[in-house]
C-alpha cells in the first residue's frame, strides 16, 4: 500500500511500514493507559486467571491504540500545522487517511469483542464507551469547540483503571470510580502545563486550548484549582478505607508536592523569551505522579492485602 | 517508479506482512490460552 502526501501539491509516493501503524497507536500515551489499567486490575479485590488478566490489559492497550489511530485520522490536518505532530504518519505523508481509519476501527472493534468474549461484557462495554468518548466526544466534538475540551476529554484517559478493576470484579463500586476521578482531576493541570509551553503551536492549529482562548492567567489559576481538588480526591480511597497506609502516606506526599509545584506556575506570568521551567517541571512531575500513585496503590494491595471492595 | 523506490516498497511490504503474520500467530496463541483458561475456570 502506498500513501500520497496530502498537504502539498507535489505528491510523493512513500510506502507505509509497520512502524507507521505502530506510531498511529500513540505508544507513549498507551504506556500510561496500560500501566493504570494493569494497576486497576492488580488492586481490585478478588482473583482473575493470569491469562484472562493479560487479555484484559491487552484489550485495554488495543482499545487505546485504536482510539489513538482514529484521533490521528480525524486530526491529520491539524497535526500537519503543529511542530510536535507534523511528523506523524498521516501529516508526514507515509500513509493514506483511510488506512488509518480502518486500522483504528479494526483495533477498536477487536479489543471490545475479545474483552467481552474472554473477560466480561461489563468491562467490554466500558472499554467501548472509553473509545467512543475519546474518538467522538473528545476528538471530533469537544476539542475543536471548547477550551474546556481537556476537562471533559480527560475522562477518556480515566477509564483504564476502572476497566481493569471491573475485569476482575465484574461490577462497579466506589473504589474504581475514585480511581477514575483521580485521573479525571489530574488531566487538566497535566495538559495545561504542556499547553502553556507549546501555546503558539495550538494557536497556529486553531485549537481552542485554554491558554489561547482564556489567557495565561486564567489557565494558571485553573491549574492550581484542579490540583487543589485533586489533593482530597487522591486521598479519598484511603479515607473510605479502600486502601491502607502505604497508599495513604505516599499519596499525601505525592499530591502535596503536586500542589507545591502548581503554586509557582499559578503565581507567575511568562515574559519574553521565557524558558517556562516551572511549567515544564510540573508537566514532567505530573507523569511521574500518576505512575507513583498507582504503584503505591498496587504495593498497598500486595503488601498490606488491602483493596477492599469499598 | 525508480529501482530504489521499488526496493523501498518491497522492504516495507515484507515488513508489514511479517508484522501481520506475527500478530495473527499471537492471536492464535492467545485464543488457545484463553480457551484453556476458560475450561480450567
Image (cartoon, rainbow, N blue to C red):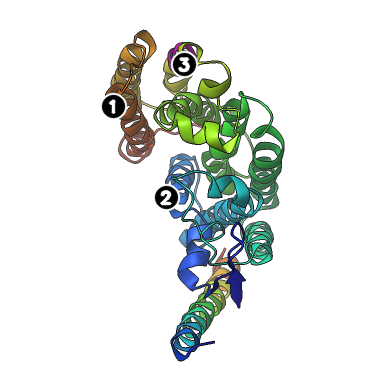
- Res. A177 in view: yes
Callout 1 crowding tier (Cα within 10 Å): few <14, some 14–19, many ≥20? few
Q: Earlier in the sequence, mark 1 or mark 3?
A: 3
Vertically, is A176 above or below B2? above
Mark 2 Cα-neighbour bin, 10 Å: few <14, some 14–19, many ≥20: few
| For residue A280, side relative to residue A39 (left or right) | left
Instruction: Tell which circle, 1 or 2, labels the residue nearer the N-terminal end.
Output: 2
Q: Give the overall secondary structure of the magenta segment.
A: helix
Give the structural element (helix, strand or loop) at label 1.
Answer: loop
Tell me which segment is drawn in magenta.
A220-229
* Above-or-below relation of A227 to B33: above
Which residue is tagged 1? A275
Cβ–Cβ below 8 Å for labels 1 and 3? Answer: no
Q: CA distance from mark 2 to mark 3?
A: 27 Å
Residue at image mark 3: A216
Question: Residue A276 versus residue A278: which sits nearer the camera?
Answer: A276
Residue A28's disc is 2
Q: Position of residue A286 (x, y in %)?
A: 37, 30
Give the quarter of the image for residue A220. Answer: top left
- Asked if the residues shown at circle 1 and circle 2 are in contact, with their CB atoms under 8 angstroms apart, the answer is no
**Which chain is disc 3 placed on?**
A
Viewport quadrant of the C terminus of chain A: top right
Labels 2 and 3 positioned on one and the same chain: yes
Q: Is A160 within the magenta?
A: no
Tell me the residue at 46%/81% (across/down): B15
Q: Would residue A249 be seen by someone viewing this image from the given angle?
A: no
- Where is residue A98? Give x, y as percent: 69, 64
- What is the C-alpha distance between the residues marked 1 and 2? 24 Å
Extreme-front residue of the structure:
A9
Amino acid at each position: 500500500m502506498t500513501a500520497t502526501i496530502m498537504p502539498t501539491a507535489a505528491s510523493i509516493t512513500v510506502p507505509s511500514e509497520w512502524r507507521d501503524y505502530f506510531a498511529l497507536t500513540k505508544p507513549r500515551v498507551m504506556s500510561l493507559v496500560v500501566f493504570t489499567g494493569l494497576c486497576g486490575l492488580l488492586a481490585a479485590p478478588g482473583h482473575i486467571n493470569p491469562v484472562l488478566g493479560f487479555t484484559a490489559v491487552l484489550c485495554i492497550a488495543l482499545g487505546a491504540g485504536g482510539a489513538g489511530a482514529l484521533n490521528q485520522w480525524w486530526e491529520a490536518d491539524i497535526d500537519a500545522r503543529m511542530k510536535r505532530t507534523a511528523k506523524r504518519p498521516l501529516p508526514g505523508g507515509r500513509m493514506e487517511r483511510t488506512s488509518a481509519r480502518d486500522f483504528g476501527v479494526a483495533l477498536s472493534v477487536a479489543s471490545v469483542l475479545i474483552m467481552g468474549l474472554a473477560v466480561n461484557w461489563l468491562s467490554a462495554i466500558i472499554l467501548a464507551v472509553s473509545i467512543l468518548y475519546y474518538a467522538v466526544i473528545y476528538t471530533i466534538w469537544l476539542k475543536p469547540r471548547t477550551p474546556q475540551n481537556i476537562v471533559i476529554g480527560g475522562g477518556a484517559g480515566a477509564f483504564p483503571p476502572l476497566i481493569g478493576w471491573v475485569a476482575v470484579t465484574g461490577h462497579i463500586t466506589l473504589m474504581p470510580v475514585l480511581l477514575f476521578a483521580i485521573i479525571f482531576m489530574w488531566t487538566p493541570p497535566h495538559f495545561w502545563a504542556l499547553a502553556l509551553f507549546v501555546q503558539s503551536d495550538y494557536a497556529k492549529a486553531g485549537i481552542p486550548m485554554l491558554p489561547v482562548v482564556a489567557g495565561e492567567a486564567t489557565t494558571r489559576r485553573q491549574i492550581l484549582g484542579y490540583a487543589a481538588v485533586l489533593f482530597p480526591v487522591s486521598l479519598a480511597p484511603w479515607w473510605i478505607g479502600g486502601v491502607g497506609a502505604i497508599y495513604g502516606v505516599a499519596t499525601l506526599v505525592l499530591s502535596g508536592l503536586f500542589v507545591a509545584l502548581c503554586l509557582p506556575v499559578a503565581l507567575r506570568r511568562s515574559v519574553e523569551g521565557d524558558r517556562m521551567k516551572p511549567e515544564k517541571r510540573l508537566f514532567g512531575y505530573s507523569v511521574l505522579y500518576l505512575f507513583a500513585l498507582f504503584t503505591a496503590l498496587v504495593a498497598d494491595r500486595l503488601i498490606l492485602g488491602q483493596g477492599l471492595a469499598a | 517508479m525508480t529501482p530504489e523506490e521499488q526496493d523501498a516498497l518491497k522492504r516495507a511490504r515484507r515488513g508489514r506482512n511479517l508484522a501481520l503474520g506475527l500478530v495473527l500467530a499471537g492471536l492464535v496463541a492467545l485464543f488457545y490460552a484463553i480457551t484453556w483458561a476458560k475450561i480450567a475456570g
